[in-house]
Amino acid sequence: MSAEKINTPHTPKENFSKGLFQVEIPKLGEPKREKVRDIWVLGDSKFRLMVTTDRQSAFDSIVCTTPGKGQVLNLMSKFWFEKTADIIPNHMVNVPHPNVLIARQAEATLPVEVVVRRYMAKSSTETSVYRNYVDKGRRKIYGIEFPEGLQQNQEFPMGSIITPTTKSSSGHDEELTDQQAAEIVDGKLGKGIWNQARNAANAIFERARIFCLLKGLILADTKYEFGINRDGKLMLIDEIHTPDSSRYWLAKTYKQKLEEGKDPDTFDKDILRRWLVEHGFKGDGPIPKVNPKIISQMSEAYKVPYAMINDKQLPVQEKNVADQVRQTVENYLNL
């Protein structure tokens, strides 16, 4: 997503009145601005600086800022990178500020999405198991045979599964079988890389799943990004087990909700999407002014799983967080 898209004039300025919208570090030049992160490649291109902002997207547009979101994504990733580093190396070097990650630059990235699912979460996306199983009546999905009689949000009887998809630059991602994923990945990055990524994803997910259950959370599914480092080795990159890349449910009410045919209590980033649909926005036309109560609900939805997993509240965000980030980065890099 380009800077022009992020700075769209069609979004009411009030939607960005709180939180970290973007960061300017003139001594580093212009960053690449993605949906959430501002990224600079440093010096000899061995490292990158990633600032996770509070930008909130929906329907492929930046709609508002959600205060605290950037810190949650960055600090939760730090927590899980540290907790899984013995399973597979990752790109984290340092976190000098709650919104800032210094990371190793990947030489190449895995050309498929690696999604691990433990539950048939209700979803309308084309690549979800639920949509294919319930809406389309399929029983062989991603090359995996699913039994009859599964209900929405049920735990899969076979345990965790990996459902790889293509990475489409335009249009929808397409589902892949394990064999297809291996052919694509190994064909680009070398024999055995897909097997390494698949094994790492399973191990990381299982460790996190058990840990989360002890904290009162169900890790229903997640997405991982992998890259190749300068030594040709596989490493975990991007973010890990954040509310943007993962689906967290409240464990203590899950069984009752399932029996009642209701969706689990979730820390749901789709609060905003539902509100936008109710107010006539599905990606086309002007973006409405978002009710401050919705932004507050979004902010809390991000903070709750952070607090449950870390046994502490999110640090209080500075009012001048953009300046604090810039100063921290300049000091850290001795600019």
Image: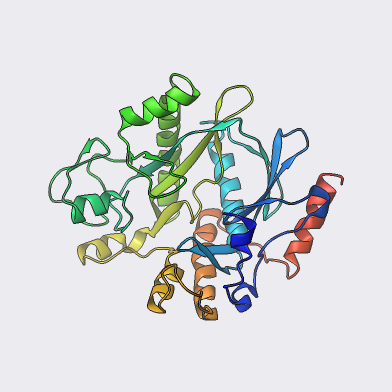
What scheme was used to colour the molecule?
Answer: rainbow
Q: Viewed as shown, does residue 41 lie left or right of 210? A: right
Which of 79/140 is in front? 140
Q: How many marks?
A: 0
At 38% from the left and 59% from the top, the residue drawn is 249
Above or below, comparing residue 290 to residue 175 in the picture: below
Above or below, comparing residue 265 to residue 153 in the picture: below
At 30% from the left and 34% from the top, the residue drawn is 177
Question: Quadrant of residue 70 in the image?
Answer: bottom right
Which of 200/291 is in front? 291
Residue 21 screen position, x and y as percent = 66, 65
Q: Residue furthest top?
A: 191
Quarter of the N terminus within the rendering: bottom right
- On the question of residue 53 being in view, the answer is no
Residue 184 screen position, x and y as percent = 40, 28
Q: Viewed as shown, does residue 30 lie left or right of 299? A: right
At 43% from the left and 44% from the top, the residue drawn is 168
- On the question of residue 31 being in view, the answer is yes
Residue 13 screen position, x and y as percent = 63, 76
At 37% from the left and 31% from the top, the residue drawn is 181
